[in-house]
Image (cartoon, rainbow, N blue to C red):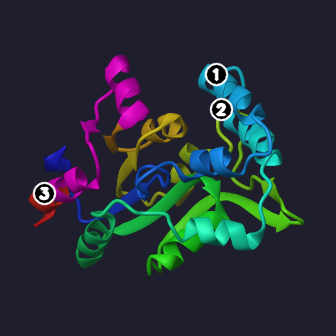
C-alpha cells in the first residue's frame, strides 16, 4: 500500500462524510432528534438486512422528519468534525492531491457543516434536499437504480466517472454505503462496519480508528 502511494504522482482521495469527516453519523442523529414517529427504525432495520436499498430507506426516513430551517441550522452548528480532517486536508493540498467528498447524506447538510467549519473548495457529490413547510424533500441525482439498487448515491459510479487515467484512487469510509465504493478504489482506509465487512470478506484494506491514522500513514508515505 505505502509503495503505491510513493510511486504515483497523482491521487484522488475520496472521503465519506458521516462518521468519517464528522465525529458522528449526522443523518442518524437527525432522525432521532427530528422524526415525528419511529417508522425510521423499521426502514433502518430493513436496510441493514439488505431487504431495501438506501434510497428507499432514506426516502421513508426523511418523510418523517419535521423541523424548521432555524431549528435545523441550530443543530448543524453543533456538528463536530474529526479533529484530524483539516490537518489531513492541508497536508494533501500541500502535496497536490485532490480531495472529493462522496456522501449518502444531503447537500444542504454537508454544505452548511463544511462552511460552518470554514472548509471551502472541496468538490462534494451527494443527495439533494429542499426544505418546505417544516418538511425535507429529497432527490437523488447520483442514484443508479438500474444496477444493483443498493445505494441512494451510487458512489462506485461517481468514482469511475471522476477518476483520471493513471491516478491512484483512495477511499476513506466507515459504513454500509461505502462497500460498493471500496470495490473501485485502489487503496481503502476503513473503520466501523466497512472495516468489519472487508475483513470478513478477506478484501485488502487499511484498518483505521479515525483520520489520525490516515494522516500519519500519508505523512509516512508521501513526505
Disc 2, SS:
loop
> Residue at point 15% right, 57% down?
216
Considering only order in the chain, which callout, 1 or 2, is on the residue closer to the N terminus?
1
Q: Where is residue 30 in the image (x, y as percent from the top left)?
A: 63, 51
Q: Name the residue under label 2.
A: 150
Q: In which quarter of the image is residue 53?
A: top right
Q: Is residue 2 magenta?
A: no
Inter-mark Cα distance, 1 to 3:
37 Å
In the image, which residues are magenta?
192-217
Q: Nearer the viewer, mark 1 or mark 3?
A: 1
Where disc 1 sits, the SS reads loop
Could you tell me residue 86's position as x and y percent?
32, 71
From the image, which quarter does the N terminus lie in? top left
Residue 38 on image: x %, y %: 75, 34
Note whether residue 189 is visible.
yes
Q: Residue furthest right?
A: 133
Amino acid at each position: 500500500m505505502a509503495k503505491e502511494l510513493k510511486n504515483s504522482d497523482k491521487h484522488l482521495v475520496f472521503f465519506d462524510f458521516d462518521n468519517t469527516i464528522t465525529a458522528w453519523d449526522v443523518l442518524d442523529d437527525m432522525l432521532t432528534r427530528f422524526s415525528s414517529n419511529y417508522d425510521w427504525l423499521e426502514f433502518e432495520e430493513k436496510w441493514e438486512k439488505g431487504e431495501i436499498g438506501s434510497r428507499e430507506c432514506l426516502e421513508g426516513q426523511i418523510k418523517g422528519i419535521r423541523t424548521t430551517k432555524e431549528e435545523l441550522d441550530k443543530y448543524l452548528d453543533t456538528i463536530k468534525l474529526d479533529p484530524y480532517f483539516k490537518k489531513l486536508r492541508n497536508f494533501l493540498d500541500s502535496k497536490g492531491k485532490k480531495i472529493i467528498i462522496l456522501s449518502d447524506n444531503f447537500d444542504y447538510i454537508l454544505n452548511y457543516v463544511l462552511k460552518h467549519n470554514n472548509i471551502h473548495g472541496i468538490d462534494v457529490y451527494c443527495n439533494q434536499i429542499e426544505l418546505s413547510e417544516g418538511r425535507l424533500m429529497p432527490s437523488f441525482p447520483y442514484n443508479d437504480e438500474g444496477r444493483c439498487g443498493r445505494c441512494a448515491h451510487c458512489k462506485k459510479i461517481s468514482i469511475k466517472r471522476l477518476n483520471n487515467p493513471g491516478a491512484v484512487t483512495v477511499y476513506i469510509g466507515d459504513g454500509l454505503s461505502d462497500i460498493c465504493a471500496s470495490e473501485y478504489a485502489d487503496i481503502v482506509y476503513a473503520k466501523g462496519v466497512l472495516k468489519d465487512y472487508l475483513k470478513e470478506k478477506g478484501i485488502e484494506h487499511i484498518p483505521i480508528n479515525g483520520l489520525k491514522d490516515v494522516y500519519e500513514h500519508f505523512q509516512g508515505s508521501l513526505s
